[in-house]
Image (spheres, rainbow, N blue to C red):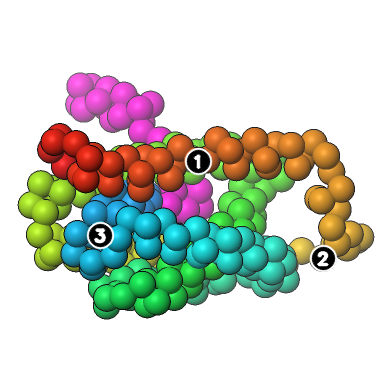
Amino acid sequence: MGTRAGFRGRWRSLSPLPPPGRLRTLSLATLANTVGTGLWVTAAALYLTRFVGLTPTEVGLGLTVAGLVGLTAGVPFGGLADRRDPRALRAVLQLAQAAVAAAYLVVGSFPIFLLVATLDALLVSGNLAVRAALVAAVGGPEGRVHAFATLRAVANLGVTLGAGVAAFALVADTGWAYRLLVLGNVATYLVSAALIMRLPSYPPVRRPFPPRPGRALRDGRFLAVAGASAVLSLHWVALTLILPLWVVTRTTRPR
């Protein structure tokens, strides 16, 4: 018994999952969601170029346009999360993202890819804003920083697990192997939505003073941090899009 208890104690100290409670439920939803992220981003560039038939230029252009359009969704969805229950809103967005993720299975041309990628980017941007409101509600005023840090560790674990599974599809390098990753991504959205709905509802909190529109755009320090974060986030594009295409098309290294 002592050995078993000691093992459980060591596992709890190493696991990024928090003790049972609302934050653990949200962590499990995040884990499911980010496993799907790892499945998709690891193989997306190769799936779209080797089996859908898009060129690397079309993939890059489509994702660029989609990303720029997607930026417009963060503010309105964030405002909606302030006026509605962020739990229910995020669950709905997860279901919508599952539908859009499944749509990659029917992409066969650049216009369809651009449409699907744009819808995906809009939902991703809006979902991130709603997620922030939900995490703040779950963590509370005193526990928000801890909640965000916990979910970041869980997200890193989820992406790592998803990428590890996706490696098998890269080795197989068949259309069905990549399609299974797409279906896996869809399934993780559904699991995440179901877990989120296990949380209690969070009715909007009335604010004594409504926020002033455009206040963030007048905060120089906030804009500086946002700009620096944007530059640092370029590594994500390099690792998930540029590097895979370069390895496959310009080198003799294994996928």
Magenta residue span: 1-30
Q: Residue furthest right?
A: 209
> What is the CA distance from the residue labelled 3 to the residue labelled 2?
49 Å
Sequence-wise, the earlier of marks 3 and 1 is: 3
Tell me where residue 230 appears, x and y as whole percent.
60, 42
Which residue position is annotated with label 3? 49
Q: How crowded is mark 1: few (under 14 residues within 10 Å), some or many (20 or more)?
A: few
In the displayed structure, 47 sits above or below 21; it is below
Task: Kindly identify the residue that appears in the image at 40 percent across and 35 percent down.
Answer: 16
141 vs 23, left or right, is right
Amino acid type at circle 1 is: Leu
Q: Does residue 176 show up?
A: yes
Q: Does residue 33 show up?
A: no
Do the residues bearing badges 2 and 1 touch, measured as CB atoms within 8 Å?
A: no
> What is the CA distance from the residue labelled 3 to the residue labelled 1?
21 Å
Do the residues bearing badges 3 and 1 touch, measured as CB atoms within 8 Å?
A: no
Which residue position is annotated with label 2? 206
Q: Residues within 10 Å of mark 3 (few under 14, many from 20)?
A: some
Q: Which of marks 3 and 1 is in front?
A: 3
Task: Kindly identify the residue that appears in the image at 67 percent across and 40 percent down.
Answer: 227
Q: How crowded is mark 2: few (under 14 residues within 10 Å), some or many (20 or more)?
A: few
Which residue position is annotated with label 1? 234
Sequence-wise, the earlier of marks 3 and 2 is: 3
Tell me where residue 60 appears, x and y as whole percent.
41, 56
